Amino acid sequence: MIDFKMENRSDIKILVAGDFMIDKYLYSKVSRISPEAPVPVATVSHVEQKVGGAGNVALNIKALGSNVRVLTCIGTDNVGDQLIDKMKEAEVDTDFIYRDNSRKTSIKTRVVAQNQQLLRYDEELVTDVGNEFSDYIKEKSDSIFNGVCAVILSDYGKGILTKNIAQEIITQAQKRKIPVLVDPKGNDYTKYSGATICTPNLKELTEAVNAKSLKTENEILNSAYRLCNENNIQYILATRSEKGMSLICKDKLEKSDFPAIAKEVCDVTGAGDTVISAMAVGISLGYSLDICCKIANIAASIVVSKFGAETASVDEINDTISSYYHKELFRKKICTQEEIVSYAHQNKESGKKVVFTNGCFDLVHAGHISSFRQARSFGDILIVGVNSDESIRRIKGDTRPIVSLENRMKLLESLEMIDYVVPFYEDTPQKLIEAIKPNVLVKGKDWEGKTVAGADFLKENGGEVKFIDLEKGLSTTSIIEKILATNK
């Protein structure tokens, strides 16, 4: 079982580019209707201002324990000054905020009573940013991207992320092998070509593929898959409100679903900002996309239980994982090689001792169970590598395996002493061991004095090899021979 937790990591820096604005809240009390018109009279008790739009993404990242650098273009007006001051108060890097005296910094004002919005009015001028901003990005690119682990494009359609600007940022990130995550706006996804992940909600996905509605799971899958391939986007993470999230890859026509976590919903404002922030932080921490999606789901469930555009803290997320969801959401025992490398790293980082053993496990018997128990005693986490069907045929002949890889892994998954099961497709697990870098490699005593795949590598890297006792007279081959002899 994965021992996952969010971490405060000051060495992680995420670049947020997009439309920054001020969110203004007029908190009021309503107790009567105006005599002048049939409208409520709001008596304002206090006023609150926050950074909004892409600024809320930056605040979410700070709340998740990572550093933030912002890239945007705002006006030289007082609202722009207030925005920068608030960013600095939150310890956000504002060195790359470009000021343009022809632009008006957006401010959105909400009149609120009893945690309900009565009215919102916007003060803004929506125009595309000029070529000067593109030139600025090119000129400052080395400084802008220095030390950045991930890039977020937070597009609110206010003219900052034009196709030219979006492509310039994505190109600069690709040069440096930095993943790019996009919270999209509008129907033109060609502007996001080359992005790693786009996170449209269901309405945005529907509009992007010019559909009237996307009602079935297949419609969502096919639409997202087409959007990925037509626009060279590696993944679409579709956020689906009460149905959670679905992840679709351009390389495979299938989706992974992440059900919503049941919590009381107070306000969905800013939930998308939280999702993309958690994804970027998780990716920067080296977690698999599967785990990133689960943690983003948890973070979103926390913010929608609050009023306004709020954030989820590291402590809130970790408390949610340990208190309610750890066993249910994070127990995934059958893993891909990519996932197991990430999981092994996470467990070692948290001080756990990782043990690895491997085999065909064609017909699991009492000898195998004994071996797993002994292996587990050498550490905290036991990873079992399983030969693929093809590798078994190469080693043992065309009559083997008796049981398919899928069913062999399902059987091993049910054993309590095993934490993870991962297939490998070569004849030996040498490459897998080099990727996982376990603390301990376990083999039967019949391997003593022989060449053990991965043993030399492990010893050179501070690991150790343990040889364990085997149950006498028990082997898959002898069981098969006995069955055949009995049925002659």
Image (spheres, rainbow, N blue to C red):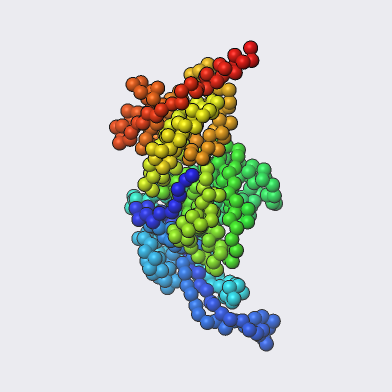
16, 411: nearer the viewer? 411
Name the residue at the bottom extreme: 35
Q: Name above or below for residue 181 compared with residue 481.
A: below
State the residue at coordinates (35%, 56%).
10
Name the residue at the top extreme: 488
Task: Residue 21: give x, y in percent of width and height.
Answer: 48, 66
Q: Name above or below for residue 403 compared with residue 285.
A: above
Task: Residue 312: give x, y in percent of width and height.
Answer: 48, 61
Q: Is residue 37 left or right of residue 181?
A: right
283, 459: nearer the viewer? 459
309, 195: nearer the viewer? 309
Q: Is residue 458 left or right of residue 60?
A: left
Task: Residue 247: give x, y in percent of width and height.
Answer: 56, 46
When asked about the image quadrant of residue 459, the answer is: top left
Q: Is residue 472 left or right of residue 398?
A: left
Q: Name above or below for residue 315 compared with residue 205.
A: below
State the residue at coordinates (43%, 26%).
470
State the residue at coordinates (50%, 22%).
475
Query: Which part of the image, by quadrant, shows the C terminus?
Result: top right
Name the residue at the front extreme: 472
Task: Residue 196: give x, y in percent of width and height.
Answer: 49, 45
